[in-house]
Amino acid sequence: MSKDTKFDMDVDDIAWCPGCGNFALHRILKSALDELELNPREVVLVSGIGQAAKLPQYTKGNMFNGLHGRALPVAMAIKATNPNLKVIVDSGDGCTYGEGGNHFTAQILRNSDITVIAHNNMIYGLTKGQASPTSLKGFKTPVQVNGVDNEPFNPLSAAISQNISFASRIFVGDFEKSKDIIKQAIKNKGFSLVDAFCPCVTFNKFNTYKWYKENTYYLEAEYTPNNREQAFERAIESEKYPLGIFYINNERPAFWETTAAYKESKDPLFKRDLDLMRLKKLIESKRI
Amino acid sequence: MSSKTLKTIVELNFRITDSTTNPIISSSKAFALAAKRYGLMSISHSDFPSRKTGGFKWDERQFSSHYQPRTFSENLDVIIALDEKSLTQQVQRYPDKFGENTLIILNKEDQPDSQFDPNEFYGTNSKFFYVPFSRLAAGSKNTSVSAFGYLGSEMGIPQDILEKAFTESFSNLPERHLNALKKSLSEGYNYKEQKDLGIEFEVDTEKTRRMLIDGNQALAEALLNWEVTNSTVYPITPATSIYDQTSDNLSMIDEILARGGVHTQTISEIESFGIAIGHIWGGVRNGTQRIFLGTSDPGISLGGELLGLVYELPMVVANVMRGTPSTGLPTMTSQSGLRQAISPTHGDARFPVIAPRTVDEMFTAVPTAYNIAEKLSIPVFLLSDRELSIRQETIKRPDLRKLKPTQPPKRSDLPLKYTGLLSYEDTGLPIPPHDLEAIEQTHLKMYSRIDYLRENDLIIKPRQDLDFYDPLPGKDNEKKIAILPWGSTWYAARDAVDLLSEELSDNGYDVHLISSLQVYPLQKILLKRIKEYDMIFVPEVNSTGQFAEVLREETKDYSLNQKVKSILNHRNVMFTPEEIYNQIKGELMS
Ligand SMILES: Cc1ncc(C[n+]2csc(CCOP(=O)(O)OP(=O)(O)O)c2C)c(N)n1
C-alpha cells in the first residue's frame, strides 16, 4: 500500500473527482520515485493541459505545466540541457496522443531520454467528456452522438513499430505491479512509455474500474520483452489488453548522448562557462 | 425571528454559493426558468472551477420585474450560502458585494439563544438568517433545491411553476430521484411559513414573451437558423458548449447531422482548420452550404497558420475568448483575441472581425458574418467571450423567419481587382493558379478584399439601440466625450453612461456611448462619429488596449493619440459599470 513519500505535498484543493484514477496513479508514481531514492530536486515533471496534466501541481519537485499537447519537446530539451535530471512527462491520452501526437512519434525516433506516463482514460476529462484518440469504437458522448467511428489509437503498437526504447502498459487499479513497471521505465535510458489505464469515473461510464479489470491481464512471467515482432503482436491484442513490459531496446543511444555538447564533458550546460579563449583562437585562425 | 417586511422590490441581486458538491448552477438555471415564466427578467454570471463537482463556486442573478437588467448591483440583496466555507470565501474575495442591507442566508439550524455574532465572525455588517436547507433536502441530498424552493416562495413564484421548471431541467434523473428532488423543493417552499424574510416582488405579468438563453446557445441557434451545414471542432472550454446544448435541449451536432451535413471532431485545431479548408476546396461554397469553426484563443494560435495560404475561404470562425496567458485560464474571460483575429496567420493577411455585444445580438451577428464571408470569400472572425458564452439572459424572442438566408451574394459582384479564383462548373472546385506569379497575384487580391469592406459597409442593419446612446438628448454641452466599448464590455459601458451623465453634464460634458458590431475594419459611420468627440474612453478586458490601437491605426489620425484613453482590466473578469465610472471621473475631474 502507499505510504508517505518525499514527493507528498499539502494541497487543499485537488481538482479531481472523488474516485478518479488519477489519485491512484499519483500515489503509484510518488511511491515509485521514493523507492528509486530520487530527491524531489532532481526530478522534473512536465505536463500539458488536462486533468491528468495537473498532477505535477500536486507533487513536490520541479515542474513545467505548459501548453496542451506540447509537453514532449519541452521535456526533451530539459533533459538535453541537464542530463542529471530525471524528466518525466505526465499528461492525458488526448494531450499525448492527439493534440501532441506528432511529438510522440518524433521523440520516439529521436530516443529522448524521458519517461512518458499517459493517463489513458479513453476520454477528454477536463473539457467534460468528448471522445479521445483512444476511445473505443461505438463509444457515445454528447458530441459523438452516433458513437465514435474511428479506430482507437494504439500507442503501444505505434511505439513498437518505431523501435521505441521501452514500451509498457499498466492499470492503476494494481498498485504494486504498476509501481514496479514505472520504476523500470524511469530507470531505463531512452524514451520510455507507460500507457496507464486510468478510469475517469465522471465522464466515462463505460471503461470503468470493473471494465479495466475484466478486460486486462498480465503478460506471462516467461514473456521476454526483447523481441520486437513478438512485442508488436502482443500490443495489437484487443480482445483483452495485456499489461506489463512489452518491449525494451537499449541498443540505441539516448538523444542527449549523441549531441556534441556532451562529447567531452557530462556536465549540465548551466555549469559551464563560455570558453572565450577558444573562441578567440578560432577567430584568430580565420584571419588571413 | 419576527416576519416583518424587509423590502418591496422590483430588482433583486442574488447569489448562491457552495464549496461542496451541490449542483448550484444547474439548479440556478432551473430557477431562472421558473422566474422567467413568472414574468421576471434576468441575467446571470458564475464562477466555478474546471471540474465536474466540488470546489468553491457561485452563481449570481440579477432579477427585475420592470426592465431587462444589463449589469449586477453593487451590493447583494440576498446571498444563500450552502456551507460556511463558501461564505468565508465570498466575504474574502468580494467584500464590496456585502452591504448593510444584504440578507445572508446560511444553511444551518436556527440557534435562537446563541450569543454567537455571525457578523463579527465573518467580518460583515449584514443581516443574517439561518435556514436548515440540508435538513429540508434530506430526501434528495441536493441542498440547492431546497434553497431555491425557499427563495421561490419568498419571491412569490407559484409552486407549480417552480416544480415544472425543475422537473424539466432535471428530466434526465431516474423517477425516484426526481421525486425526492421535488420533495426537497416543496420542503424549502413551505419553510416560508416558519420563517419569512419578507421580500416582496411587484410583478407586472403583461410582459412580452422572452426566452432564457445563454450566449453559446444563442450562437448555436443563430448558426442553425442561418443554415450552417458543416462544422469542425477540437474541444475547448468555453467554446465546446456551442456544440452540445441549445436552449431546447437539442445539440447543434445532432441538427447538423440530421440535415445531412458533416461534423468532425478533430485531434487538434490544426486539423480543424485544415478540414474547413478541405470542405470548401471540395465544393462547400455555393451559398447553400456553410461551414463553421468554434474555438478559443489557444485554438486560433494553433490553427491560424492554415489561413495563410487560402485563396477562397468563406467561413466563420468563432473565438470564445478566455483568460490569458496562452492555454491558461479556461474559466475566466478576456478580450485578448482582437489583434489575433485580425492577423492570425502571418503579418500580411488581414481578416474582418465582428464582435457581438449582447446575447441577443448573436442572432444578427451570425448573418452579418456569413454575408461578409460569402461576399468577400474570406474567413470572418466572430469574437465572443467566456462571460457572454455562459451569461443567461431573458431576451426578446428574435423573429427567426426574417433572419433566414435568401440569395447568397455572388462573388462576381466584386470588382475585378478583388476577385480571386473562379471555379470549374462541373466540379465546383476552384481553378488553381499554376505558377508562382499567379499564386502571388491571387494572394494580393485576397488581402486587399479587406479594403473593399472599408469602402462598402456590408452590415445588414445597424443596431441603433446598441450603436449609439445619448442619456440626455437635447443637452448640448460644449465638451463631448464618448465611451466606446466593444464586445460584451458594452453592458457595463452602457450602464456607466447612465451613472456618469448627470454629474458630467453639471460639469460641462456630454457623455455618449458609441459602439459597433464590426470591429475590424472600422465602418465609415463609426469613423465619422469618432471625430465629434473631444475624448474617447475605450474599456477593454485586456492588458494592451487592442481596440484602442485599432482605432488609432484605422483613423490614421495621430491627434487621436491624445484623445483615445484606454481603460484596461487584465484581471480576466468583466468590468462593472462602477469601475468605468470611477476611472472616467478620475480622469476628468482630476
Ligand atoms: C490549444 C488547445 N486546445 C484545446 C484545449 C482544451 N483542452 C484542454 S485539456 C483537453 C483534453 C483533455 O483530455 P486528456 O488530455 O485526455 O486529459 P484528461 O483531462 O482526460 O486527463 C482539451 C481539449 C487547450 N487547452 N488548448
Image (cartoon, coloured by chain):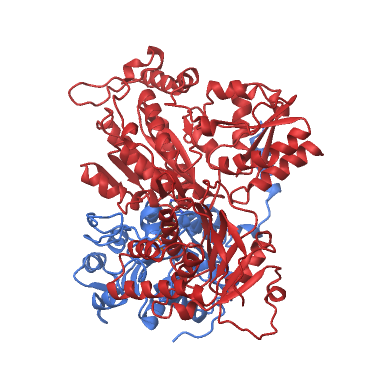
Residue B514 position in % (x across, y down): 59, 31
Residue at horizontal 25 percent and vertical 66 percent from the top:
A235
Q: Of residues A285 and B27, which is closer to you in this image?
A: B27
- Residue at the image position 70 percent from the left and 47 percent from the top: A276
Dividing the picture into quadrants, the one containing residue B428 is top left
Q: Which chain is blue?
A: A
Quarter the N terminus of chain A occupies: bottom left
State the residue lying farthest toward the right. B590
Residue B214 visible? The answer is yes
Left or right: where B427 falls relative to B411 = left
Q: Is residue A69 left or right of residue B118?
A: left
- Residue B120, position as x, y percentages in the image: 72, 75
Residue B407 x %, y % = 29, 24
Residues B130 and A87: in front is B130
Q: Quadrant of residue B430?
A: top left
Residue A39 visible in image: no
Give the quarter of the figure containing the C terminus of chain A: top right
Chain B colour? Answer: red
